[in-house]
Amino acid sequence: MQAEERQGIERFVAHNGVDDVMLDIMLPRNDNTVAGDEQVGHEHNAVGLPVTIIVAKDKVEDVIKALHLGADDYAVKPNVVQIRTDRLGFRGAGQATPVRMLGNYRIRERIGAGGMGVVYSAVDTRTARAVALKVLNPSLADDQVAVGRFTREARLAARVRHANVVSVVAAGREGAVHFIAMELVEGQNLRQTCEERPMAAVAALAVTRQVAAALAAMQQSGILHRDVKPENVILDHNNVAKITDFGIARETVAAGRITDSGLGVGSLIYASPEQMRGHGDHRADIYSLGCTLYYMVHGRDPFPGHLSLDEMYRRKTARSPRIDAMSATVPTGVRSLILSMLKPKPRRRVQSYADILTSIDNMLARRSSPRRAWVFAAVVAGAFAWRI
């Protein structure tokens, strides 16, 4: 969007009381339009209005692609006017959050968004309990694949009861609106926590231990998360880590492999090589957790985000990320743990969460032992690092 176009929209909005912005963008896009389209989410904030992308295709993959561009909604030609009339009745014209109840939950404010829906803070009117309410985008209400994924997410997340897993309170539907009520965690995800500076090694180990324990509980329940990454781990104000977003989680069979391979690989940067091929067992989640630990202590993703799918796969199968490129203040023990979790071949990778927990416990025990001489290594961006 050029500056003059944005100024024109702002003037039009100011003088005409506009409640909604609709952009007609044909999908799929060619490479020349990607950069411009991906500014949608940033540019529409200049006028402070909800944005709907209008396209001719209604496959779930295209819906997700449109929403990832930053749109608030999605409408399919030719019934755009009727679709927008129905949807604005739910969301409230010109408002950032819904204005009605969903089941027993009263919406308060929007707190996040993903490819298939939006998350709001809400209150259970029966108990006065604050919850996070994940709402499937109304554009997907008639898509059986999307609804099936959303329903499965609620079912699998509700199966796991663990202190380090965001708990599901309830799931329901009102009209065409599907929603999941979850535990509301006040805090930041790891991406937000580490975006300004890396985390101290001891703190990163403590977080990794909690997430590993949560993933072990999921494995015991026959579930693979398949999307472990900094955005999906929330730290509350007491530094308790909570793993969330079961959107592409899968059940496992007795052998520990997923029941339906090939569906979803999570973040390509954090996915294991075998998961990128549509396969994998719990060791794929171990790989993703290793990438997350790398990010926490290094402050950067383990692989460049600009790589093509083929190049990303080649790099991951060739070798683990360069540990020697990490800050020299990262303890040797932490580097060794990361390396063992990021082996390209699953059989050479650390094999169990019990092994990870034991390794971390040993490092933390040496950290606190009075018989061990601990040496202050450096202060990096305000974080202490210790030699293990």
Image (cartoon, grey):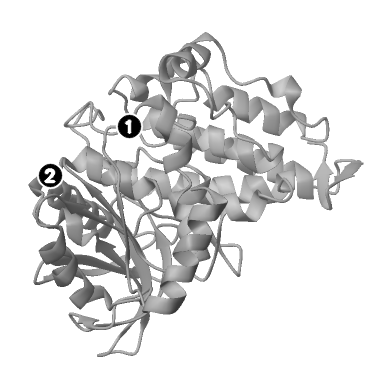
Can residue 228 be seen from the camera position used here?
A: no
Quadrant into which the C terminus falls: top right
Q: Name the residue at 39% across, 46% down.
A: 69
Which of the 4 image quadrants contains residue 192? bottom right
Q: Can you tell which mark lies on residue 145?
A: 2
Give the foreground label among 2 and 1: 1
Secondary structure at badge 2 equals helix
**Between 247 and 250, the one nearer to me in the picture:** 247
Query: Three-letter amino acid code at disc 1?
Result: Arg
Q: Residue at x 36, y 55 (%)?
A: 71
Mark 2 → mark 1, Cα distance in angstroms: 23 Å
Between 238 and 53, the residue placed more toward the observer is: 53
Q: Mark 2: which amino acid?
A: Val
Q: Which mark is residue 256?
A: none
Q: Earlier in the sequence, mark 2 or mark 1?
A: 1
Rate crowding at label 2 as few (under 14), some (14 to 19) or many (20 or more) other CA atoms within 10 Å: few
Q: Nearer the viewer, residue 152 or 139?
A: 139
Q: Position of residue 267 (x, y in %)?
A: 42, 36
- Measuring from the top left, give residue 352's x and y in whole percent: 44, 31
Mark 1 residue crowding within 10 angstroms, few (<14) / some (14–19) / many (20+): few
Reading the image, the residue beneath label 1 is 29
Give the structural element (helix, strand or loop) at label 1: loop
